[in-house]
């Protein structure tokens, strides 16, 4: 009888969690330029557990030739291209995005610029690549990543301070 009281709740917990696939979304800045940049976003997404001893506070440095990946969302269910675009646009990018170049020049994009070839808000631009890992349970992806490429040609149009 005692074993039944222990096994039944354990079995119920296993069944309930086994049917719920989880997912995670990532946003990557791929700095292929010859400049160090500081990626500054205005969306409400501010905190994720420490990465290398720092919280995400709305800024992230990306050295020349390096990539920075921000884990932006996750939970139960699945993800896909449309889902990660919505999360990125509404919760990460927000109203505006800035790239501060070598601490001197600033390149700013606004949410209304959905057609500019260099705009992070133009999710159909060639600057974006999308990757996903299909869920083993079907019905969508369990991991998705949007990567935004920054290069010298894009940064050349920066506003001089």
Image: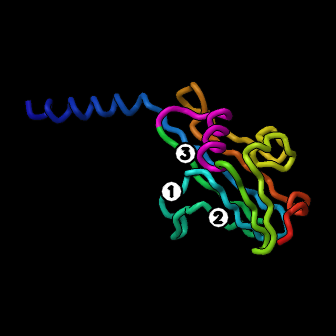
Q: Can you identify the residue that label 3 sits on?
A: 73
The residue pinned by badge 1 equals 48
SS for dot 3: strand
Residue 34 among those drawn in magenta: no
Identify the residue position indicated by label 2 in the image.
Answer: 60
Of helix, strand and loop, which one carries label 2? strand
- The residue located at (38%, 33%) in the rendering is 17
Q: Residue furthest left?
A: 1
Distance CA(mark 2)–CA(mark 1)? 13 Å
| Residue extent of the magenta highlight | 76-93
Report the residue at 72% width, 45% height from top. Answer: 111
Left/right of residue 128 with respect to residue 146 in the rendered view: right
Residue 149 location in percent, x, y? Answer: 80, 53
Residue at 64% in and 64% down: 60
Of the numbered discs 3 and 1, the one sitting upstream in the chain is 1
- Report helix, strand or loop for mark 1: loop
Q: Is residue 128 left or right of residue 46?
A: right
Q: How is the image coloured?
A: rainbow
Horizontal and vertical percent position of residue 19? 42, 28
Callout 3: few (<14), some (14-19), or many (20+) C-alpha neighbours within 10 Å?
Answer: some
| Mark 2–mark 3 distance (CA, rounded to whole Å) | 17 Å
Q: Is residue 81 above or below residue 127?
A: above
Front-most of 62 and 132? 62
Are the residues at dot 2 and dot 1 in contact (C-beta closer than 8 Å)?
no
Viewer-nearest residue: 61 or 142: 61
Q: Residues within 10 Å of mark 1 (few under 14, many from 20)?
A: some
Residue 83 belongs to magenta span: yes
- On residue 86, the disc is none
The one nearer the camera, 41 or 84, is 41
């Amino acid at each position: 009888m005692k074993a039944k009281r222990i096994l039944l709740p354990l079995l119920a917990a296993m069944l309930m969690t086994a049917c719920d696939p989880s997912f995670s979304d990532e946003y990557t800045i791929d700095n292929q330029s010859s400049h160090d940049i500081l990626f500054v976003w205005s969306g409400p997404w501010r905190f994720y557990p420490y990465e290398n001893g720092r919280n995400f506070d709305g800024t992230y440095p990306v050295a020349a030739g390096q990539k920075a990946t921000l884990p932006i969302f996750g939970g139960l269910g699945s993800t896909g291209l449309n889902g990660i675009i919505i999360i990125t646009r509404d919760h990460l990018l927000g109203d505006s995005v800035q790239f501060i170049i070598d601490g001197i020049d600033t390149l700013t994009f606004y949410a209304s610029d959905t057609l500019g070839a260099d705009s992070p808000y133009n999710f159909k631009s060639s600057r974006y690549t999308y990757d996903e890992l299909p869920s083993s349970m079907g019905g969508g992806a369990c991991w998705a990543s949007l990567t935004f490429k920054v290069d010298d040609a894009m940064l050349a149009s920066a506003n001089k301070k």
